[in-house]
Amino acid sequence: MDDRIALLRKILDESSYTVALCGSGMMEEGGFIGVKNPDKAYDIEKKYGYSPEEIFTGSFYHTRPKQFFEFYKKEMLEDAPEPTESGKALAAMERAGKLQCVITSNIYELSQRAGCRNVIDLHGSIYHNRCNRCGREYPVNYIRQAKGIPACEDCGIPIRPGLYFFGEMTDSQLITRATEEVHDAQVLLLLGTTLNSEVFAHYIKYFEGQWLVVIHKEKHFLDDNADMVFIDRPKNILSRLGY
């Protein structure tokens, strides 16, 4: 264990409350590329005639459900990412009492599937789907296996994926909870994301703790504002902490 990894381990051991913010880099380190990636977004627009930002909206879901679910099942549900070593390391940290909360932007419950228990999914989850009329819930495989539009068996209307569409406001209670977790943190880990993240920047400004630690694969001009920076994939650092 080199000196900087040893120092991070010491920081985490001495922390009374540690929170991790997990960005898209946590999926990309496993080889998964999200629909907002510029190259993938370009391919999607060529294939469907609309950009991901146009398709994955409430208005598109309501007015063009057939096209919406064709895109959703193919581009967002097919070949969904699996947890990486990062998720397993975070779960080990949580079991050891060294991690109190995970706040994530991914929709695939990667942290929970790796073993973490206290997780805030800011953008929802593909695993929780419901009928907006009767409230009946449906598993993700019901949507995956549906021919055409997956409809409620009782009401006959399209099932609503358990996600926040682009442009939708996150539930205010979820925002409040995430804000409070960051505010209470003594150590804040930014994993696979940066200080100017469009998802996390709002929450980072509430951090008043002692150590802001960034682990991401590329240098960023705001890195100097962190207390410790590792230019690497999170899995390569977290797995070396030894929890």
Image (cartoon, helix red, strand yellow):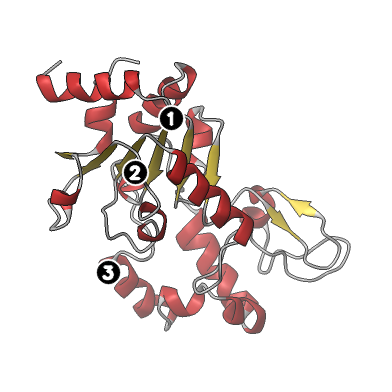
Query: x, y percentage for residue 76?
Result: 48, 58
Q: Nearer the viewer, mark 1 or mark 2?
A: 1
Q: Nearer the viewer, residue 233 or 197?
A: 197
The residue identified by callout 1 is: 17
Quarter of the picture containing the C terminus is top left
Residue found at x 73% / y 69%: 158
* Residue type, numbered disc 3: Pro
Residue found at x 82% / y 59%: 135
**Which class describes the residues within 10 Å of circle 1: few (<14), some (14-19), or many (20+)?**
some
Instruction: Estimate the spatial distance between the alpha carbons at disc 2 and disc 3, rounded to whole Å.
Output: 18 Å
* Residue type, numbered disc 2: Met
* Residue type, numbered disc 1: Tyr
- Disc 1 and disc 3 in contact, CB within 8 angstroms: no
**Among the 4 quarters of the image, the one containing residue 199:** bottom left
The residue identified by callout 2 is: 26
User: Of the residues under marks 1 and 2, which one precedes in the sequence?
Assistant: 1
User: Of the residues under marks 2 and 3, which one precedes in the sequence?
Assistant: 2
**Which class describes the residues within 10 Å of circle 3: few (<14), some (14-19), or many (20+)?**
few
Q: Nearer the viewer, mark 2 or mark 3?
A: 2
Please tell me whether residue 44 is drawn above or below residue 11 in the rendered image: below
The residue identified by callout 3 is: 38
Q: Nearer the viewer, residue 124 or 82?
A: 124
